[in-house]
Image: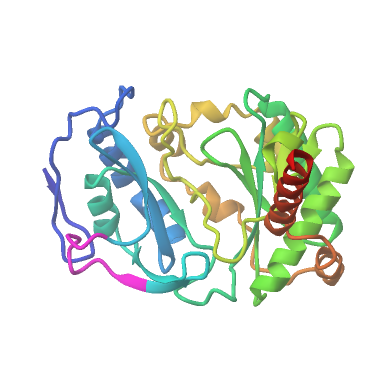
Amino acid sequence: MSADGPGPGPVTFSSLDTPLAAGYPETKRDLVGYLDAMADRLVPVLAGRALTVVRVNRGEHFVQKNLPAHAPDWVRTVTVHSEAGHRDVRYALCDDRATLLWFANQRAVEYHPQLFLGTDGDRPTHLVVDLDPPEGGAFAAVVTVALAVRQVLDDAGLRSAVKTSGSKGVHVVVPLAGESAERAAAATRAVAARAALLEPTVATTAYVRDEREGKVFVDATRSGGATVAAAYTPRLRPGLTVSMPVAWEDLPDLDPRAATVRTVPGMLGDADPWRDLLPAPQPLDEGLVEEGRLVPVARVAAMHEGRRRARARREAEG
């Protein structure tokens, strides 16, 4: 089987009827068929952005950042320096249907683009608040916290859209107009802190998992060089669930498990709800930015706390 795309293609597929991964009844054909059906909606949210994918190979899944050497020479790339890894990474740019289908043939299940275009890491195009429930937590708690995040944003004059993560949480997204990475990160921290104060019995900003007390984690770290699961990406979860856009008024009644690679194309028809639900890019509220600059960066605070605990253990033992 092969499929032509706007790139040089055609893309040739193999082993379509084999199980996609160990323990999954879905086949590679299910993945390819879904990505083929959704290409006109998925490619626009990936185009121009350094792409990280989650692939399956010989039954094992792994994260892939660097484009492999065997990739076709027509797959466009961008080189981005990783501050954390102290190295340059050659990412793919999924700018067309042919590239998406090539990734599908490589058993790339999940698609996680950067929040900026090209190499312009200081100009994020979106603010994202990621809500992550505890293991076994009810989706209703996530909804409660998502509505609190929306209230904080509304109060700051910022319009937002929401989608499921494709796993057990949701992403609240604000398109940005001409904002720096530092300002976006600060505003995200302020939004998270305010939302946790609105719903203190079910929400927390505690970065360390064992300090969350069974609450929904309001993650303010989706900024800078972070990636986020794209709208419409499949996730390597039971049923191959999909990161699904949803209208705010429909969120309380949503069953996130209902959106899968087998159901979403039929549910949407020709519609593109993410395109329709996303507001126009907007500037950040200055109050949020200034407040957020006073909120400690979660990863840094957790690192210092970890060092403090380690030092206390050594002192207690010595």
Q: Position of residue 273 (x, y in %)?
A: 53, 47
- Pinpoint residue 99: horizontal percent, then vertical percent: 27, 59
Image point 61% across, 37% down: which residue?
Answer: 169
- 305 horizontally vs 106: left or right: right
Placement of the C terminus among the 4 image quadrants? top right
Q: Residue at x 67, y 33 (%)?
A: 133
Q: Position of residue 75 (x, y in %)?
A: 25, 66
User: Picture quarter containing residue 121?
Assistant: bottom right
Residue positioned 83% across, 44% down in the render: 196
Q: Is 119 colored magenta in this rendering?
A: no
Q: Which residues are magenta?
A: 68-78
Which one is nearer the viewer's eye here, 235 or 225? 225
Does the magenta segment cover residue 76? yes
Q: Relative to 189, does residue 122 appear above or below in the rendering?
A: below
Relative image position of residue 102 (x, y in whole percent): 23, 53
Tell me if 304 is positioned left or right of 107 in this view.
right
At x 40% / y 60%, what residue is drawn? 51
Q: How is the image coloured?
A: rainbow
Q: Give the number of callouts.
A: 0
Q: Nearer the viewer, residue 296 or 223?
A: 296
Residue 140 is left or right of residue 265, and the answer is right
The secondary structure making up most of the magenta span is loop
